[in-house]
Image (spheres, coloured by chain):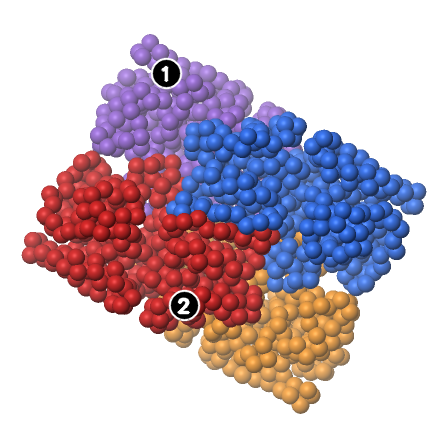
Chain colours: A red, B blue, C orange, D purple
Amino acid sequence: MKALVYRGPNKRAMENMPRPEIQLPTDAIVKITKTTICGTDLHIMKGDVPTVNEGRILGHEGVGVIEEVGSSISNFIVGDHVLISCISSCGVCANCKKGMYSHCESGGWILGNLIDGTQAEFVRIPFADNSLYHIPVEANEEGLVMLSDILPTGFECGVLNGQVKPGDSVAIIGAGPIGLATLLTAQFYSPAEIIMVDNDDNRLVVAKTFGATQVINNSLGNAAEKIMALTNNRGVDVAIEAVGIPASFDICQTIVTAGGHIANVGVHGKPVQLNLDKLWSQNITLTTRLVDTISTPMLLKTVLSGRLQPAQLITHHFTLDQVMEAYDTFADAMTEHTLKVIITNSDFTVQV
Amino acid sequence: MKALVYRGPNKRAMENMPRPEIQLPTDAIVKITKTTICGTDLHIMKGDVPTVNEGRILGHEGVGVIEEVGSSISNFIVGDHVLISCISSCGVCANCKKGMYSHCESGGWILGNLIDGTQAEFVRIPFADNSLYHIPVEANEEGLVMLSDILPTGFECGVLNGQVKPGDSVAIIGAGPIGLATLLTAQFYSPAEIIMVDNDDNRLVVAKTFGATQVINNSLGNAAEKIMALTNNRGVDVAIEAVGIPASFDICQTIVTAGGHIANVGVHGKPVQLNLDKLWSQNITLTTRLVDTISTPMLLKTVLSGRLQPAQLITHHFTLDQVMEAYDTFADAMTEHTLKVIITNSDFTVQV
Amino acid sequence: MKALVYRGPNKRAMENMPRPEIQLPTDAIVKITKTTICGTDLHIMKGDVPTVNEGRILGHEGVGVIEEVGSSISNFIVGDHVLISCISSCGVCANCKKGMYSHCESGGWILGNLIDGTQAEFVRIPFADNSLYHIPVEANEEGLVMLSDILPTGFECGVLNGQVKPGDSVAIIGAGPIGLATLLTAQFYSPAEIIMVDNDDNRLVVAKTFGATQVINNSLGNAAEKIMALTNNRGVDVAIEAVGIPASFDICQTIVTAGGHIANVGVHGKPVQLNLDKLWSQNITLTTRLVDTISTPMLLKTVLSGRLQPAQLITHHFTLDQVMEAYDTFADAMTEHTLKVIITNSDFTVQV
Amino acid sequence: MKALVYRGPNKRAMENMPRPEIQLPTDAIVKITKTTICGTDLHIMKGDVPTVNEGRILGHEGVGVIEEVGSSISNFIVGDHVLISCISSCGVCANCKKGMYSHCESGGWILGNLIDGTQAEFVRIPFADNSLYHIPVEANEEGLVMLSDILPTGFECGVLNGQVKPGDSVAIIGAGPIGLATLLTAQFYSPAEIIMVDNDDNRLVVAKTFGATQVINNSLGNAAEKIMALTNNRGVDVAIEAVGIPASFDICQTIVTAGGHIANVGVHGKPVQLNLDKLWSQNITLTTRLVDTISTPMLLKTVLSGRLQPAQLITHHFTLDQVMEAYDTFADAMTEHTLKVIITNSDFTVQV
């Protein structure tokens, strides 16, 4: 089958790979219909994710159709349309029982990392009963691809952890796909104000159409001052870090009001300085989180009821044959104005 | 009246000062029966608290008897025995309405800081209706002095913010009065394990008698390794910082398990390094807090019912005339094995 | 001054009454600009509220301007525009400190009940610092009158207590002003489905325009069956009782799904049958509540930011001189299609 | 194998039954070492539980050793010592994902009800990965049998749902095994006062030794009055119903204070009257729950750390051969002073 394979730092190839097979009774094989590329895939390509070995098929997002199930699978049968979660979770270890699927003792983020992923015609999904979700045949599958990772990530790590409440003022630092997913789902809780910060004016324009009440271009590095001015020096109730660098974390700790929340969403490569000398008395709560995808059933409901429209995050379309080009477009987001790309396994309709 | 007065860095004196008077309808004048010294008072004496001016009467803890009330006071009458909260709170500003008394817009920690405090024969208490608590005449007043500050501080900033739960493993870094207050109140929630860390063996012996399940002397700086060993490399559910220095914060961030809590109690004078490169994916929650004293009514109930016995924190007794000596003993805690000192206004019984 | 006075069951009169005066340092006198009539006022008129004596000025809702303040008032000065809360709360008793203002030991619902109310030119507000809220001079005052009672009531007793969450299915039994206020504020949390039940088609039409996803006319008493059919026999996550009779409570206990919530908002005159033989194993949570108005600051923010538009609940306008007619129109809601009426103190502009 | 078999109302027999076999990949076969009898088993014997058919092996509690595992079992291997949960849960259906195992779509309370149970030499456990718990070989297995049902039931339905907090006053109506399990686990949260109510003086004596601060014999039906007197007419913060009859529910609704909780634990056969005419304004929360056993891992930790000593609930010991006699002793609890009985599969040591 066709697949996008990691061949070491800055090397990737569209290759012909063997079709995955059931290995354990809890596995399922899914034929991919739609997949996408994540910022994390770009990190992998740079060689920044040491757990990913050469020869790995990338991708941890997608929707598809069940092709085969292991002997203990009870939730799914062949032909079911499914959403693939970026987190594989056994559901029965101590962490899974607490709802912390991200730290599943035998799962977690393994797809396109420790095992082969979704940027291929087929993928093997471990713990399929707990890691796949039914989707209606008639659903907008492209939009649902956003539920594999970025929407639960923005929602769980940013909105839930940040405890966004009606009437709150919220600032989101970073208007990339994850920041925008946070913006969309923050509105579930009706904050009075959502301030988006980015260096890219195009993304800020998009943010406005997605519901931001204020946008700030931080090219000059003065976003914190601007936010303090906007809030009469009070600061915001919730500051959400959706970039993953010290500078954006620093904005968050500068603008959070007494009693407020800093919710970290970004993937950080370096430590940051935490100003405990100022913050020790400020009654703040700072959270970190790898997405658990426990909110996926709820997000599915909001999408199917029309309250959340994730397809608006999609800017470009490719076929699986064009996956190399899709990577280029996604990597060159600033020029191409890329948010999320959809990669369609176009052979699919023929084969069914 | 007699009072302990701050005369600039490293200078204090027992002086004769004018008796305080009612200034606002919401004030009360309290005759002090028992007071104490806080670690913060030592910081003030070093000149580390710039808000405290020369000539200030120190002290923010104590119990006493109502001497006079302002015209709008409805909760108290002359002669009532009262506990003084270290936090003065109007009860009606936006922060007070959220229960965040520490950030009361016209109060907060002002006693012995912005206004004269309790290490004196009399003290003026602003917002007395909301900042004093009734205590029974027959109560152990010495124990109740511990409810002015250290017990709510340990409980709110450490135990409540750390979300200690039955069955949890908890580590408390620092076995001074605040750390021990945290230890006592952590047991309200029946954790399975409480590990105390300090450099002073005497304090660790006390910690054992107060309910610690394990104690670790960190003189060699290897507490984190020892805790990881004790927990089979899992770490603890709740790590409580009760010192206020980068090294003890660093222990906390090293030992906290995925999904766990770091609750900062200590007063920090410097920023710390936060290892977001490791922690971004660890689903941790880090909190800071200046005590709000909203738990004081509950703590009073547990003391009056005998579940909490705060008098065990008291190691030395002095009269108000001996307050200078009391400071020396408190400052020299390691040699004197001091935890909390009680200072009794011994003229009191004569005057009533 | 002019006032609407209760003269015993079914007797009311527009009378000339003495202007209220400051009685305690914590009082304020407010000149009413806008007030309204509540369903509870109709109950009083029927003689169903024994705490209301003859001669009482009715009304517990309104906005106005501070005319005079007691000596301990710190939050307000003469001329401030204010929202009057239907609950008067001292802010410092044990219940107020828990945020349960409805059970304030010296306040609670006393306006237009135990003391004279707001359907007059002036009103005395006890505990004014804690019972009034600043409103901007330029605000839509008519809409803000809805924040005195019905919006916090629907929100706190229905939405907060019912723990409405994104993606939930919610049923609200009763589409009167309180039910509609519940409908408006339930949307703060983005439920997937809100089913409104009433016997009055006009109110159901309104409910649709206010955001109901389904409406059910229960004239035939089969709402429960219809809701079970609509939900594929699963029932709803949250069932909100907004009428106050056994029949509507019974719908709630029939339609609530396992793990769901029944939130009672209605004022009940009789006991109900609770089917514990069916419900004991259903993991349900049933709540009751007299509004505490602790959400008023948050609701104000959502109104001022435009997220909540309470003026849409207003169907009729009267002057204070027409208050007798306003009562008739409000009482005859089914014929007149009345939701909320606004009563304007029209002399106001002249006097200022 | 030997087993206790239900043969219709009031008929039970010790019979020779076929050994259970693996039916699904998610099954395990457990050799019982210790089991017990539940009040629910007595209900079944009276014919009150229509889901139980003639020929059913009873019992839903016990500890044992893994004899055989299905092909998808990953948590357990043959020879592991295990605790059996009374609730079988797939872990992956919508309710299980919410932690509501009691309403597992293919499990729930099925052991000794819809499928054969634990009062036998062997039992088949469905969804074994999620329904069994590892126990150390050296543990006190008799005490751990109390974790199959009554301790999580008392804790989840009574203590957690009742939201018992430090300093609270709690009343538990019913001092049978479940009421006493509630009493033991309520102390995890350090309430100031726990009042136990029963008609049996012996049980009240036991309750005192288990930590009750007050006990009330309700033979005269005046428990509610006595509790109101004990609490200065304030009532209790948490009222826990642990009997399952209207009279004890009525005590709860009479004694609960404003803002308090009624937590239903008892199994009810009839509806009750809920006094909404009094309670609508009292801000109370009433909960029902079939135990989910999600607290089992935490309870295990508290037992293994010695904080909870469940063996004190055991009053009588029998071998599996004496199971008929064990039923008689358990049924005649008042005369025999029975709390929980332990039934040991005595052939076990021989066979291993």
Q: Any mark on residue A235, and which?
A: none
The answer to whether one can see residue A280 in this image is no
**Residue B132 screen position, x and y as percent:** 74, 51
Query: Between marks 1 and 2, how big is the CA–CA gap?
Result: 75 Å
Q: Amino acid at mark 1?
A: Asn
Q: Which residue is mark 1?
A: D345
**Residue C165 screen position, x and y as percent:** 41, 57
Q: Is residue D317 above or below residue B222?
A: above
| Residue nearest the observer in this picture, C58 or D26 | D26
Q: Is residue D306 above or below residue A31?
A: above
Q: Is residue D215 above or below residue C257?
A: above
Q: Nearer the viewer, mark 1 or mark 2?
A: 2
Q: Quadrant of the C terminus of chain D?
A: top left
| Residue nearest the observer in this picture, C276 or B190 | B190
Q: Quadrant of the N terminus of chain D?
A: top left
Q: Is residue A95 above or below residue B115?
A: above
| CA neighbours of label 1 inside 10 A, class few (<14), some (14 to 19), many (20+) | many
| CA neighbours of label 2 inside 10 A, class few (<14), some (14 to 19), many (20+) | few
Q: Residue at x 40, y 24 (%)?
A: D135
**Residue B215 screen position, x and y as percent:** 57, 28
The answer to whether one can see residue B22 in this image is yes
Task: Judge from the rendering whether residue A207 lies leftward or rightward of residue A237; answer left or right.
Answer: left
Q: Which residue is mark 2?
A: A219
Q: Residue at x 11, y 43 (%)?
A: A18
Q: Secondary structure at mark 1?
A: loop
Q: Residue at x 62, y 87 (%)?
A: C346
Which residue lies most toward the bottom here? C350
Chain of residue at mark 1: D
| Residue nearest the observer in this picture, B65 or A233 | A233
Chain of residue at mark 2: A
**Residue D241 screen position, x and y as percent:** 53, 39
